[in-house]
Image (cartoon, helix red, strand yellow):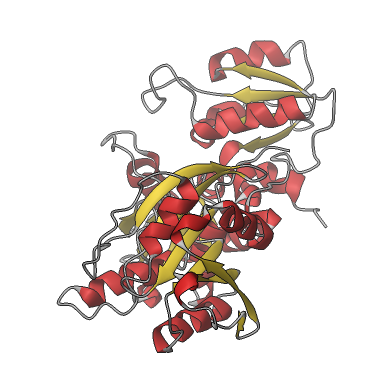
Amino acid sequence: MVKLNRPHIGIFGRMNAGKSSLINAISGQETALVSDVAGTTTDPVRKNIEILGIGPVTLIDTAGWDDRSELGSARVEKTREVLHQVNLAILVYAGEFAQPEQELADLFLAQKIPFFIVHNKADLFPHAPQKINEVQVLPYYQSAGNADLLAAIIRHLPPSAYQTDDIFGGFVEPGDEVVLVMPIDTSAPEGRLILPQVQALRGLLDLHATAIALQPQELAAWLKKHTPKLVVTDSQAFKEVSSVVPPHIALTSFSILFSRLKGDFNLFLNSTPKIDQLQDGDKILILESCTHSVNKCDDIGRVKIPNWLQKKTGKKLIFQTLSNLDPLPADLSVYKLAVQCGGCMVTRQQILDRVMRLARAGVPVSNYGMTIAYCNGIFNRVTEIFRCEK
């Protein structure tokens, strides 16, 4: 089993509730600035740590939910956006559990975010409740250490947040040969492989399958002597690769593998053919899930996919790109299609939260690999292996 997810754990509460102290206690480091001045934390602060039994996690220290300063509404909005990114919430209060805490608890419940409550400075309030709204309260004070906090995180964090199913989803067995076609071009990082390629290699090693890595130019000669179980290619090489892979050999792409691993495969599958319904002037939302330097000639999301879509439809389309996990636009009704990247840098929940909000707004959502395959006329072939999943 390959662990591809890094769970995100958000620390929420009022100003001066002790959120920053708590994140420092969990991480064992001075990660967040601690001060008696209200509103010290303005933007969400992230810290990556390793928790035994879970693995790497990201802690997010948020601004005070009750911030009413001049910039308070913007800070609270950033805190609200963090709710769409976390797998677990920790609600911190000191002394009195009142309206701000109840508002946060209601949001966690509405968005089905697992959470627990920490009563900070509990040594000063010996008669505090042990449960609030049927949620267990963890008493905490500065000299208590972090063992109870880490145990509570392990207890409340859903295993699905950090345990990921096999990237090949049962379609590859021990001993199978799988060809990974990995072009080394201007978009490839110098001296490295891109993350989906690395994760696919690791997945095959975990399965005790045989991985054959090569560039598109070597594929035809290799296939003359071998019949692999599956060929996985970079989506950008679909046209070149599909022309040399015989029909009896399954073919897909790294991005389509990730559409199952990180997204909603059936949503992408059913949305992609709606490309044919696009009209002049329609707005398309391109969803990247990382921040990277943009190659103005070869960038996959900002150059190649827009060009392929306009060539396929024959229409003049308008494109907007969101990078990293920037908030979705307030009005989603203006978009006729969204195209989500594979999501190798983020968690499945973060991808699902984003694409399901678009789907609820009536926006068809495709995936990079499926969109490229559709524009190149091989959509059915490269998704066929996964269409019969139960």
Residue 96 vs residue 105, the one in the foreground: 96
Instruction: Say how many tags the image has.
Output: 0
Residue in the image at 24% along x and 66% along y? 36
Residue extending farthest to the left is 70
Against 280, is 334 above or below? below
Q: Residue 92: image x %, image y %?
A: 46, 71
Left or right, residue 362 beside residue 33: right
Q: Residue 131: image x %, image y %?
A: 62, 81
Residue in the image at 36% along x and 64% along y? 62
User: Which picture quadrant has residue 132?
Assistant: bottom right
Residue in the image at 41% along x and 47% along y? 47
Left or right, residue 365 beside residue 153: left
Residue in the image at 80% along x and 34% along y? 172
Residue 318 vs residue 130, the one in the foreground: 130
User: Which picture quadrant has residue 43?
Assistant: bottom left
Residue 19 shows in the view = yes
Residue 364 shows in the view = no
**Quadrant for the C terminus in the image:** bottom right
Left or right, residue 43 beside residue 284: left
Residue 343 vs residue 214, the one in the foreground: 343
**Quadrant for the N terminus in the image:** top right
Q: Residue 366: image x %, image y %?
A: 53, 57
Q: Residue 340: image x %, image y %?
A: 48, 54
